[in-house]
Image (cartoon, rainbow, N blue to C red):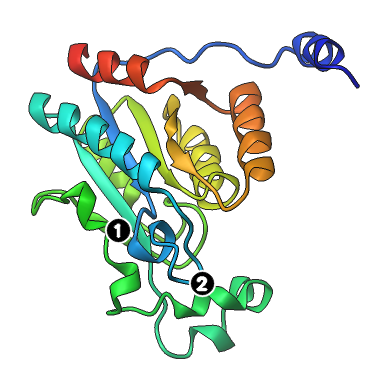
Amino acid sequence: MSDAETDRIYERAGFGATVKRGNRPAVVVIDFSRGFTEPQFATGSELSAEVAATKELLDVARDVGHPVLFTTIAYDEGDANTLAWLAKAPGLVILAAGSELVDIDPRLEPQANEPILVKKGASGFFGTDLADQLRALAVDTVVICGATTSGCVRASVVDAVQEGFPTLVVAECVGDRARGPHDANLFDIQAKYGDVIALEDALSYLANA
């Protein structure tokens, strides 16, 4: 199927409308922990460019006072015997609570007042109080960065929309282990769940919201 044919099918279905942006955004960084952003770890990949772009975004958000929140995956001893996800993806068990792998990538310079929500599932909203924290901050738009595009980012985007938050995904600030899943999921997010936007657009939006 050609790109033009695909576009016609999605247009006919009514997908791809533009997200209405609010004036109280928050940046949510999904799982940019060392276990995902450093390729020496089995769960990691080379995401230096994505981390650098995210740091640029965070600098602007912090300068103007927009909330920044992080998530990280961390498993306790015994989780491998009880969590279905670990039966499917047993390699994730190395993301052990208290290990260096679950620490937020230090290049992002997480601040003491920026929450780090610990999760055991894919979505940043599953099993956490992320939605409650965003509502308490009167957030009306969520800007998402992080890893991986096809896994925890996508799951978090879907749940953000289901929680009622217009959602933006910054293309330069999300990454995956392989290009195919990354591109396919950005396509699907743009069609159905949020706007996939360029870093320059995101920087301007945060600076002026």
* Residue in the picture at 48% in, 90% down: 78
Residue marked by disc 1: 117
* 60, 159: nearer the viewer: 60
Q: Is residue 6 left or right of residue 38?
A: right
- At label 2, which amino acid type do we have? Ala
Q: Is residue 158 left or right of residue 142?
A: right
Task: Please state the horizontal and vertical placement of residue 124, each as a whole percent of the image.
Answer: 42, 52
Question: SS class of the residue under badge 2?
Answer: loop
Question: SS class of the residue under badge 1?
Answer: strand
Neighbor class of circle 1 (other Cα within 10 Å; few <14, some 14-19, many 20+) is some
Q: Give the residue furthest to the right.
A: 1
- At label 1, which amino acid type do we have? Leu
- Residue 158 showing in the rendered view: yes
* Residue in the picture at 87% in, 13% down: 5
Residue marked by disc 2: 42
**Distance between mark 2 and mark 1 Cα atoms:** 23 Å
Task: Please state the horizontal and vertical placement of residue 35, each as a whole percent of the image.
Answer: 40, 66
Q: Are marks 2 and 1 in contact (CB under 8 Å)?
A: no
90 in relation to 46, above or below? below
Q: Earlier in the sequence, mark 2 or mark 1?
A: 2
Q: Is residue 169 left or right of residue 9?
A: left
Task: Please state the horizontal and vertical placement of residue 144, each as a whole percent of the image.
Answer: 39, 36
* 158, 39: nearer the viewer: 39
Q: Is residue 82 left or right of residue 66?
A: right
127 in relation to 28, above or below? below
